[in-house]
Amino acid sequence: MSDPILFRVEDGLARITLHRPAALNAFDEDLARAWERVTVEATSRDDVGAILLDAAGRAFCAGGDVRAMSERMASGADLHAFALVINRGIRALTESSIPVVAAAHGTTAGGGLGILLSSDYAIVGADSRIGSLYANIGLTPDLSVSAHLAAAVGQRRALQLVLQDRMLTAEEALDWGLVAEVVPGDDPAAIADAVRARGEAVARFWLQGAFGAYGQAKRLIRSQPARTFAEQLEEEARTIGAAFDTPEAAARIAAFAAASGRAKEQA
């Protein structure tokens, strides 16, 4: 049996690939445990400066594997425990100071929406469709959907999505602010490859820049709801002060000042 997740770290980039293509990368117990393990590892390693989430096959993630649920779970307590395992991975990503990009080609539905929302920058293809669909099988949103969806698109739009069996088109998802980019194309396989390539390009952009500062900016915004306005201002001030003392900032500030000085001399 193949691994349910492929994981590798190269030149500061951690790539996490959902790898149950025959099941549209829907989560069963094996995928859930692998997800927990690799996300915790990726966000704990000192050699990781950016994380890319992508997926094998023709979809990003169809949520939970309903067939596996019906066959292997005897009660709601089993499903509760199953969700908690995946949640630990979602928390690892959203609470870390490492920026995360999702290359979410094809379909994203149910709990897959929560996986997409655990990223900080999402890219989809022109043929992508994104929806909730929990109520279609009598279940309620989980895997951070109720926590993150309204923050991403606003409460009214979040309600529109979870109270209907609607699947957003890629352009609708972009208009709503749910995703950052839509990769064009007509052939699904070519679009999927292009989405993955664009996701890697975004991650490499972070790594080639001040990735520590990008990560702290992500942390400030993600963690803001836990603080008052005054506390957030203090945390911003503390963070920028700490960043100023890093060798990376010192080098970049010196280079900027030198370039600015040359520009003034030439004016």
Image (cartoon, grey):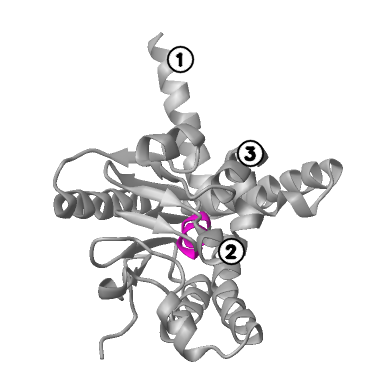
Residue at image coords 30%, 85% = 3
Query: Which residue carries the number 1 mark?
Result: 264
Instruction: Judge by depth and name the residue closer to the eye, 164 or 86.
Output: 164
What percent of the width, then of the height, locates residue 257? 50, 30
- Which mark sits nearer the N-terminus, 1 or 2? 2
Picture coordinates of residue 69, whole percent (x, y) = 48, 82
Residue 98 image point, x, y percent: 52, 60
Q: Earlier in the sequence, mark 1 or mark 3?
A: 3
- Name the residue carrying label 2: 96
Residue at which label 3 appears:
154
Element under disc 1: helix
Q: Secondary structure at mark 2?
A: loop
Residue neighbourhood size for the residue with mark 1, other residues' Cα within 10 Å, grouped as few (<14), some (14–19), many (≥20): few
- From what the image shows, is residue 230 above or below residue 21? above
Nearer the observer: mark 2 or 3; the answer is: 3
Which residues fall within the magenta stretch?
A: 111-117
Q: Is residue 142 left or right of residue 113?
A: right
